[in-house]
Amino acid sequence: MVKIVYSAGLKCLEGYIVQVEADLSDGMPAMDLVGYLGSEVKEARERVRTAIKNSGYDMPLKRITLNLAPADIKKYGTGFDLAMAVGILKTLGVIPDRPTEDAVFLGELNLSGSVCPIRGVLPLVLHAMRAGFKRCYVPKENAVEAALVTQMEILPVSSLAELAEHLCTENRIAPIQNSDHAETLEDETCDLKYVHGQMIAKRGLEIAASGMHNVILFGEPGSGKSMLSKCIPSILPPMTMEEKLEVSSIYSVAGKLTGTAALIGKRPFVSVHHTVTDVALIGGGAYPRAGLAALAHKGVLFLDEMPEFKRSALEALRQPLEDRMIRISRNLGNFSYPADFMLVGAMNPCPCGAYPSASCSCTFVQRKKYLERLSKPLLDRIDLCIEVRNPSYEELNLSSLEEDSATVAKRVKAAMERQFCRFSKPRFNSQMDAQEIRGFCEPDEEGKKIMEKAFEKYRLSARGYHRILKVARTIADLDEKERIGADHLIEAIRFRNADLLKMV
Ligand SMILES: [Zn+2]
């Protein structure tokens, strides 16, 4: 008689329910696993058999067949072990054949029969909930994370023997209470009130955050580029619960959620070192895993010393910047992770960092080469360029308090709401296409004259011209104006990234 137990698997962030069918028949003692399985799943044969034996149950001298359906999806990972063991114990009659069709079993078994944590529990449980299941048996270490899904009963399991006893007698394992306390805490040190001076840079960041524009900060080493960048998440509006679960799911799949702080509650700030490989940045591997760009989803991807990055790594970012998704093709099919981040780059004005002061020791050619490491197609995706200067003595010793991030965040939120209202959905000015720019970015009469002059003076390309209009649209939104005026355009022109190229 075939026994059925349910488990769940993941393809990137997308879940699917797996029906584990277990059958016991006469014949040569063996254990067969079928159902389009990856190598780790095939190895479950030895893990499950030994775990059952070491949990105190005798394996019969019979043929056991396990089928993992659906057979058309290739299954990876070790999370099906627990469901397979329960299926076998049911066919052996160890676990009474009470229906478990409203339950999903997740967890890896080790040889002693203990249940080990797995990756991706949060998206797995979310999917099980959407598929109509009522309870999930999960590894104890993953229980806090699983309990973020409030509509699901979560039962933490530490060993196969414990689970078998529970299923025989009912109610031995207590469901875990839903965890409101599991949120990661805000880092208090990253607040604009601790950054002295830098009025222009702060204004630039406020504009960038309001329209989710990608941005480059350039200035001497030590002028505060990194510190300013770290403050960006604090001026973005807090994530909704849906966004928090989506971001936490990515961290869960990447194995980066810790037991006690299971919910990523604040917007991510992912700082990338310039030695990063393309795979670490974008994701990859035989079975593609999420890279750093996906971990920055709904937050900031920060590239310090941007020209020092390998050209291939920077170029690999162009596609996610365009689609806000990372797509990886493999023989096994296409894999995708969401990667909707704000790109923030920081760079020195020249290799030694001192330009344009007289102490700069770089030659013209060295400077040119340094700046040329940023390709034009990449710069085309960066709307603002902000110069960060070393603060003056007076600025550093200002006794008056600086504006805090919360105050700026209110203005940013209001400007974002104007955009959502205009586009009738959550969409930002930085994402406007040519048609939307025509529709929403027409300057007033005075503004048109300014743009005409700027077009000739700076010999703007069509893309450069559109970038200025998009940024001006955000500035007008911050100013609560429906029409783009001359002041908005002048400020947008000041932040355009061609200034960076002009230095060459
Ligand atoms: Zn220099």
Image (spheres, grey):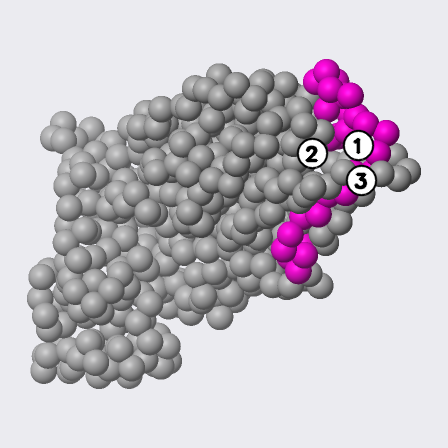
- 132, above or below 175, in the image: below
* Residue type of the residue flagged with mark 1: Glu
| In front of the other: 292 or 165 | 165
- 318, above or below 49, in the image: below
Report crowding for label 2: few under 14, some 14 to 19, many 20 or more residues within 10 A (C-alpha).
many
Instruction: State which region is magenta.
Output: 47-74
Local SS, label 3: strand
| In front of the other: 256 or 360 | 256
Number of numbered discs overlaid on the protein picture:
3
Residue 96 percent location from the top left of the image:
60, 27
Q: Which residue was labeled with disc 2?
A: 91
64 left or right of 353 in image: right
Question: Toward which corner of the image does residue 33 lie, by quadrant?
Answer: top right
If you read the primary sequence from the N terminus, does the residue marked by circle 1 or circle 2 appear first? Answer: 1
- 76, above or below 424, in the image: above
On residue 46, the disc is: 1
Residue 235 visible in this rendered orientation of the protein: yes
Q: Is residue 443 magenta?
A: no
On residue 25, the disc is: 3
144 left or right of 280 in image: left
Question: Toward which corner of the image does residue 22 lie, by quadrant?
Answer: top right
Compute the Cα span from label 1 to label 2.
18 Å
